[in-house]
């Protein structure tokens, strides 16, 4: 059996949606982590980092419960659409966003924090609001970190398994991603198909990371000129 | 020469030439630093006020408080009659609303922008044509118009300094803070930039707080000098009043004088700008010529002389400009890394630093008769610690 390109297309859609959402959601969280001087900040940092160490099944289980019919979110979803978000593409996106959160937020926050504070101070003394300072000074100087964060969350979502299985199940065209497909094939003793699919995923992730590190090299050459 | 065309008649000029004063009373402690706090009160009129002091004296903290980057614990900061910080009424304007120009020590130019983009950054409130017009005028006034399209990474240190000043001044600040912005420059470049700055302020009439630890800059720029030490104002006045006053002994010791003696003024020659002091040490006393400071005959001081400022001769030197030539005898020679520390007994005992080559070519050894040569201005007078 050949590669099931539908699962690839679905996985790419999922990874793309997750990266975009994490850019929107991760930027303010990372900004807050980089610049807040709140004394309990470490609690938030620990929560954001939690998906790094938690077994995906644990995370997936809680997301499943949170999306289920007994949770407020589930009831709200039922009242809106008639069904819960569990075993849907949207549910998969929610689970994946939480699962990949540290892969986006940590590089973002690290690159924000490494921007010279004097530049931020200079921007303020020149009358710029913090929003303008962010978009004109902090973000442009953090581009390598932003690219890394987006690419890592993309790649991480591409290869995710446990959360998808718990939250999404295995519905072809809706929630069956590449890694689930590979698992399925191995279960069905289709080793040739599993091998082809796995190889394709490996190459895709490798190319993605190559682009990121190539970009980093270019950026660091530019920075060393300074 | 009129290098400053209609920059300040441009659209959006906030501040006509009405004279503003800075009133500043600040107390600021730092968590974990028991023995350092900034506690100052001063007024600064339009023109240059020099903040002079060793590093760690609190100069940058003071500027950061005025700019709003650091929040004082207590006090009041007013520019003209506009309070930008007042702990008693809870006023604490954000940095962006203070209209305080700040040129940082490391310049803090935006590295991803051209010279022109850096300069126009603070003019966001203007329409684009007005913004372009004022930016161009400012670039011309600071003689950097030819660099406008260049990235600030690719221009020289002096040019960057000019971009940094232009970027700060183009916003028409009501107060200007300069934190050693010219420290890295050679003197001709520095004096050109200072000329341009003074020229600019003739039309602006705003207070300029200028941080430096260069004595030369104090005399070149200062109408008023504030000497800071350990967060407090040690002295305030004109450069002449402040800089000819004897230093506090604590400052001098920090500055590293190997030779410190008790001294009493024997004679004063105001016309020559010198005086004669009698130094006393363990083995007796000698007279030396020192620079003139306030205090008449009989005033007690301490005199500090750096070991590296003393010349050593093996024959009586003649036809020298140095006024103090003192006979003595070497009592010890110690090698320290690549330098020789010699102790010479000449009524008082002095430490002299020499190179290894000097020791060898002069064939110095313990017991040898030598002459110490000390320039008048190498003798630093200090108040005795109380």
Image (cartoon, coloured by chain):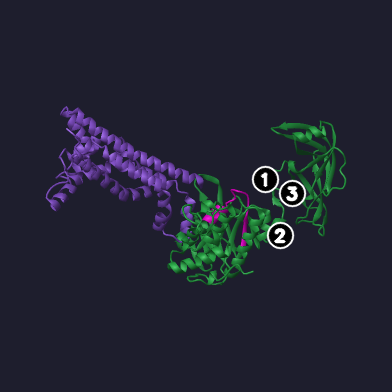
| Neighbourhood count class around disc 2 (C-alpha, 10 Å): few under 14, some 14–19, many 20 upward | some
Which chain does the numbered disc 1 sit on?
B
Secondary structure type for disc 3: strand
Distance in Å between CA atoms under marks 2 and 1: 21 Å
Q: Secondary structure at mark 2?
A: helix
- N-terminal label among 2 and 3: 2
Q: Is residue B116 magenta?
A: no
Q: In the image, which lettered chain appears purple? A: A
Left or right of residue A127: residue A83: left
Disc 3 residue crowd, few under 14, some 14–19, many 20+, Cα 10 Å: many
Mark pair 2, 3: CA separation: 16 Å
Q: Which image quadrant is residue B19 in?
A: bottom right
Q: Which residues are magenta?
A: B48-64
Q: Residue at x 72, y 53 (%)?
A: B246
Residue B232: tell me if it is visible: yes
Q: Quadrant of the N terminus of chain B?
A: bottom right
Q: Closer to the camera, A48 or B338?
A: B338
Q: Position of residue B290 (x, y in %)?
A: 79, 51
Residue at image location 16% in from the left, 42% down from the top? A173
The image shows residue B12 at horizontal and vertical percentages of 47, 70
Residue lying at the far front of the rendered structure: A2
Residue designated by label 1:
B255
Disc assigned to residue B240: 2
Query: Which chain letter matches label 2?
Result: B
Which shade is chain B?
Answer: green
In this rendering, position of residue A153 left or right of residue B187: left
């Amino acid at each position: 059996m050949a590669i099931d390109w539908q699962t690839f297309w679905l996985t790419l859609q999922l990874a793309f949606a997750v990266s975009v959402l994490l850019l929107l959601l991760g930027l303010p969280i990372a900004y807050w982590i980089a610049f807040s001087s709140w004394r309990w900040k470490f609690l938030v940092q620990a929560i954001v980092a939690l998906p790094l160490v938690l077994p995906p099944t644990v995370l997936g289980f809680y997301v499943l419960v949170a999306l289920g019919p007994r949770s407020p979110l589930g009831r709200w979803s039922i009242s809106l659409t008639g069904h819960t978000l569990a075993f849907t593409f949207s549910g998969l996106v929610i689970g994946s966003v939480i699962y990949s959160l540290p892969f986006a937020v940590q590089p973002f926050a690290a690159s924000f924090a490494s921007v010279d504070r004097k530049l931020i101070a200079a921007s303020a003394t020149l009358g710029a609001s913090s929003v303008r300072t962010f978009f004109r000074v902090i973000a442009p100087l953090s581009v390598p970190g932003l690219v890394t964060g987006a690419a890592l969350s993309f790649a991480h979502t591409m290869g995710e398994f446990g959360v998808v299985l718990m939250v999404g199940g295995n519905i072809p065209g809706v929630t069956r991603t590449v890694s689930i497909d590979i698992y399925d094939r191995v279960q069905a003793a289709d080793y040739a198909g599993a091998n082809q699919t796995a190889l394709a995923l490996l190459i895709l992730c490798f190319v993605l990371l190559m682009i990121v590190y190539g970009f980093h090299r270019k950026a660091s050459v530019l920075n060393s000129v300074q | 020469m009129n290098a400053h065309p209609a920059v300040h008649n441009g659209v959006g000029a906030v501040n006509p030439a009405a004279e503003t004063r800075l009133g500043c009373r600040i107390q600021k402690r730092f968590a974990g630093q028991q023995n350092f706090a900034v506690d100052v009160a001063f007024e600064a009129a339009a023109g240059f006020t020099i903040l002079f002091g060793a590093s760690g004296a609190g100069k940058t903290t003071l500027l950061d408080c005025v700019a709003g980057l650091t929040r004082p614990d207590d006090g009041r900061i007013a520019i003209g009659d506009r309070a930008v910080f007042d702990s008693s009424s809870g006023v604490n304007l954000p940095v962006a609303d203070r209209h305080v120009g700040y040129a940082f020590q490391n310049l803090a130019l935006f590295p991803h922008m051209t010279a022109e983009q850096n300069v126009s950054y603070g003019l966001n409130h203007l329409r684009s044509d007005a913004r372009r017009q004022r930016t161009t005028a400012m670039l011309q006034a600071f003689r950097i118009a030819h660099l406008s399209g260049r990235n600030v990474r690719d221009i020289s240190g002096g040019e960057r300094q000019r971009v940094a000043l232009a970027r700060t001044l183009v916003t028409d600040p009501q107060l200007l803070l300069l934190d050693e912005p010219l420290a890295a420059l050679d003197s001709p470049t520095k004096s050109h930039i200072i000329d341009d700055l003074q020229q600019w302020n003739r039309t602006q009439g705003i207070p300029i707080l200028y941080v430096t630890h260069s004595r030369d800059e104090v005399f070149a720029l200062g109408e008023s000098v504030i000497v800071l030490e350990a967060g407090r104002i040690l002295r305030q006045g004109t450069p002449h009043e402040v800089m000819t006053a004897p230093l506090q002994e604590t400052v001098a010791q920090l500055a590293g004088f190997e030779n410190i003696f008790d001294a009493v003024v024997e004679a004063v020659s105001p016309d020559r700008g010198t005086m004669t002091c009698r130094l006393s040490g363990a083995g007796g006393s000698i007279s030396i010529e020192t620079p003139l400071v306030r205090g008449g005959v009989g005033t007690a001081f301490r005199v500090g002389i750096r070991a590296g400022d003393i010349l050593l001769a093996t024959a009586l030197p003649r036809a020298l400009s140095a006024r103090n030539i003192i006979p003595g005898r070497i009592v010890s020679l110690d090698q320290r890394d690549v330098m020789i520390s010699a102790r010479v007994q000449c009524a008082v005992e002095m430490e002299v630093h020499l190179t290894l080559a000097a020791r060898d070519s002069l064939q110095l050894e313990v017991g040898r008769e030598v002459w110490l040569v000390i320039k008048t201005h190498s003798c630093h007078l200090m108040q005795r610690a109380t």
